[in-house]
Image (tube, rainbow, N blue to C red):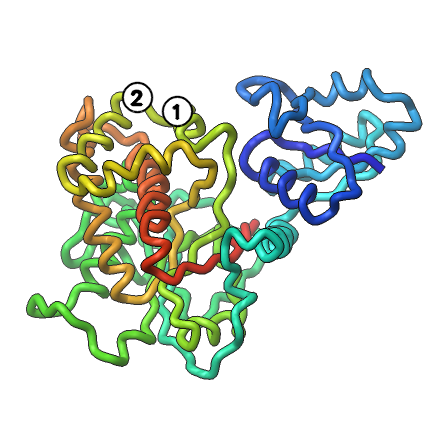
Amino acid sequence: MDIAIFGAQGYALGAYEALTTLYKKRKVRCFMVSKSGSNPKTLAGLLVLEISQLYSQLSSAEKDELEVFIATPESVQSEIEDVLESYGFIHHQRLSSVRWNDLMTLYHTRTGDLQPLSTLPIGCHEPFIRLYAACHEKDTPLTEDYKKCEYVIPIQAGAGMADRKVCAVRDDSGENITDRNGNYSELTALYWIWKQKLELPGGQQAFSQDSTREYYGLMQYRRVFDLSGDDLLRLVDNEVDAVLPYPLPYEPDINAHHKRWLKDADWEALETALTELQPEYGAYFPAVLTQRYLYNYNMILAKKSVLRDYCRWLFPILMRVEELSEPQGRDRADRYIGYMAETLETLYFMKNRDRLNIVHTGCYLLK
């Protein structure tokens, strides 16, 4: 039975790569979309066809046998199922975030490109974890119950500009950039974590021995890390420095992907800021842009010292970008800084992958 993958972005491309690696006897016929729009015409060397185009090319027997994997955001998968059935495609299944996590773990275990956290041996030392979940007053309520672990702490991002309080912990106390939330998105919460929780009092430069078991991080109220109890026991004894979400692949590279969302002038500002403040990273930046993997969502869980060092590196660059941008960052609110930070997270951890013990896990998308 042939496979068609519904979707034409990073999620769908990742599914294709995993399926064709893990199940070599299965043939992926093409990618499907509702409308071509801004989607690519080909992906992984296969055609990207509108559902009506594919329908017209198939015989009745082929329609009955075709299996469709729906590799799109979960919020639209139910609607896509209805469309598929209206065309007579009856064999379909959703690639939910749960299935995606399992698929990526199997794929990266097979290829050895990335280290899945769940493949490490289980240790016996429990870490101290504070994983903050960024929320915003305009977030839509979840429609399903989510039992938060005791180490997950909701934090209201952009709280200083909000009309109402939605979390007990807010990003507008102490030293903060809550007023820049329109551009920094969830990163105003990360800035607050950095300044309130990661920097040592009195300018001390070394953490205590116990702090090697301390992990801090950021995720989102709707997009959460897939972490089991056993996964937590893998952190300390395996000396894990950072846990990142599985990256998404883009074709032909992540530079082409970001051009869909950011202006060339903003990229030039970023390149200038890197050259001025971090010339070693600036020299490495082109190599990162011309590879295919991007760490999305600005999500991270890391040792206290590792996350502190990352924040010390990240935020001066972003603030210099604001100064160089036209218009300047304080005069706009289009989230461009948050988008840039995804690429900077990719740059930082790819450049330091030989120095840091970086592992990966999936994310759940809550409804």
Count residues near mark 2 (Cα–Cα under 10 Å), then give few for <14, some for 14-19, many for 20+: few
Q: Residue furthest left?
A: 202
State whether residue 182 is above or below residue 315. above
> How far across and how far down the image is residue 251, in percent?
51, 30
Decide if residue 182 is in sight here.
no
**Quadrant in the rendering for residue 89:** top right
Using the numbered discs, state the Cα–Cα distance from disc 1 to disc 2 in whole angstroms.
7 Å
Q: Nearer the viewer, residue 346 or 135?
A: 346
* Residue that carries the numbered disc 2 in the rendered image: 264
Decide if residue 67 is in sight here.
yes
> How far across and how far down the image is residue 265, in percent?
25, 21
Q: In this rendering, would 205 be left or right of 252?
A: left
At numbered mark 1, what does the secondary structure look like: helix, strand or loop?
Answer: loop
State whether residue 120 is above or below residue 71. below
At numbered mark 2, what does the secondary structure look like: helix, strand or loop?
Answer: helix
Q: Are marks 1 and 2 in contact (CB under 8 Å)?
A: yes
| Rendered residue at 64%/52% (across/down) | 103
Q: In this rendering, would 297 be left or right of 330?
A: right
Which amino acid, mark 2? Answer: Asp
* Residue that carries the numbered disc 1 in the rendered image: 259
Q: Residue furthest right?
A: 61
Q: In this rendering, would 245 be left or right of 97?
A: left
Q: In this rendering, would 3 be left or right of 126?
A: right
| Rendered residue at 57%/17% (across/down) | 37
State whether residue 56 is above or below residue 279. above
| Rendered residue at 23%/31% (across/down) | 271
Which amino acid, mark 1? Answer: Lys
Count residues near mark 1 (Cα–Cα under 10 Å), then give few for <14, some for 14-19, many for 20+: few
State whether residue 185 is above or below residue 361. above
Q: Nearer the viewer, residue 217 or 314?
A: 314
Where residue 146 is drawn, which disc sits there?
Answer: none
